[in-house]
Image (cartoon, rainbow, N blue to C red):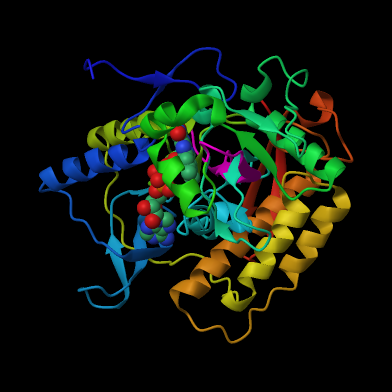
Amino acid sequence: PGGGLSLTREGGHHRNRIIHAGGDATGAEVQRALEVAIARDPAIHVVEHALVLDLLTGADGRAAGITLHVLGEGTPDGVGAVLARAVVLATGGMGQVYSATTNPAVSTGDGVALALRAGAVVTDLEFVQFHPTALWLGAGARGQQPLVSEAVRGEGAVLVDAAGKPFLQGVHELADLAPRDVVAKAILRVMQSEGLDHVWLDARRLGPDLLARRFPSILARCRQAGVDPVHEPIPVVPAAHYASGGVRTDLRGRTSVPGLYACGEVACTGVHGANRLASNSLLEGLVFAGRIGADLARDLPPRVEPVDEGLETGLVDPAGRDELARRMSVGAGVIRTDASLHQAAAALAGAATADVEPRPEAWDATNLHTVSTALVQAAIRREETRGSHWREDFPERDDARWRGHLLAALGTDGVLTETYQVAG
Ligand SMILES: Cc1cc2nc3c(=O)[nH]c(=O)nc-3n(C[C@H](O)[C@H](O)[C@H](O)COP(=O)(O)OP(=O)(O)OC[C@H]3O[C@@H](n4cnc5c(N)ncnc54)[C@H](O)[C@@H]3O)c2cc1C
């Protein structure tokens, strides 16, 4: 109200450092401001409702544009191409790899899969952050689950078990505001020991006024699901939230393919390490998008003629997508073992690919399959527990063997290879 920035705190934070807007509608405000800025710039041509498929490259391997499928809605439906002197991937995360995620339906790992097919290096895919508190919508719930923001705990809500007992005191010095992996693991331990499919977040102490003023969207979403946080604890469960890994870039957003840049959740700049600190992703997007913009304004590469549309890998049948996501959640979710990961790998290897019609659902299923396969392969290899990669069979961090990155790339034969690089 006074014109200053409104700050709050989230998991792992020792002081209030998170700017927010509209109570809990910060993302909507970021998007609104971006849309206004884009509309004001006549040099930007927006193609809406288009699904980017693959990277076009020139004879020298440099990015030359993209292929895309325009999905109707006033524009001709069909596959086309956009030629470009540089391509910036900003396609977001890959939460839809799992059956429960806070990510929207569009988070299907398209940018990472495209980059792999284009021969780019991807890294750190095994580090998936699970948000501890997605709203539990029932045992059969699939896809995007509403997030009950950490800021609710920042304002004083506590996680409790079936008896209403708080369980994070003594687990970590920050208790309910401990880093996300610590909280997610603590929740899973309670769920396992008490035979529950969720725990509860008790926000009643915040009172009706603070809940309505600070968390109007969360309050409305909970009530829509039949839970009133003013009067009862909110059922919550961990869900896939953020991919710390992605297309490997340097500190200027450049990938290993000349002319191909990446920023935001699709990228792995390295700033999140093995476990992103809450709310650092929007900051990362802002910083690296700015750097890429400055780089391109200064040094836009010359135009090259496309000669190659990237690797043809065949399409995965979308009918099996839900089952693969379920197998990923069970085998490669918060808790992983060699056996569980191999079960997920076997399910992925058995995915149907014959006679699949090329349409958006098939491209989504194929991209999810590609990134899931790379993720599982890396998670199998990393025999230690570090950050958000939690191996039950290797519970300790092992710096002697694993203080470094697994880099994955698809060969021209379609085989995914992985190399280990010691951290510099
Ligand atoms: C519920 C929730 C709450 C969060 N809260 C916070 C927070 O408080 N602070 C914070 O820092 N981070 C937060 N995060 C994480 C953060 O929102 C994301 O990491 C960030 O929005 C990613 O931005 P992005 O621009 O990389 O991708 P997105 O914002 O996901 O945008 C990607 C865009 O690319 C489009 N796209 C994808 N594939 C294709 C394709 N093949 N063709 C064409 N277009 C495509 C998508 O439709 C989408 O419009 C939150 C995430 C979630 C899910």
Q: Residue furthest front?
A: 231
Taking the magenta stretch, the answer to whether it contains residue 383 is no
Q: Is residue 92 above or below residue 47?
A: above
Going 38% across and 65% down the picture, which residue do you hit? 51
Q: Position of residue 108 (x, y in %)?
A: 51, 58
Going 58% across and 27% down the picture, which residue do you hit? 157
Question: Foreground residue, 116 or 46?
Answer: 46
Taking the magenta stretch, the answer to whether it contains residue 242 is yes
Q: Position of residue 409 (x, y in %)?
A: 62, 52
Q: Is residue 348 above or below residue 328?
A: below
Q: Is residue 279 above or below residue 51?
A: above
Q: Would residue 304 be found to the left or right of residue 132 on screen?
A: left
Figure quadrant of the N terminus: top left
Quadrant of the image occupied by residue 403: top right
Q: Position of residue 413 (x, y in %)?
A: 64, 66
Residue 252 appears in the figure: no
Figure quadrant of the C terminus: top right
Q: Position of residue 10 (x, y in %)?
A: 53, 25
Going 63% across and 56% down the picture, which residue do you hit? 98
Quadrant of the image occupied by residue 394: top right
Q: How many marks?
A: 0
Question: Foreground residue, 23 or 270?
Answer: 23
Question: Foreground residue, 68 or 342?
Answer: 342
Q: Residue furthest bottom?
A: 355
- Highlighted magenta segment, given as a residue range: 229-250
Going 67% across and 54% down the picture, which residue do you hit? 374
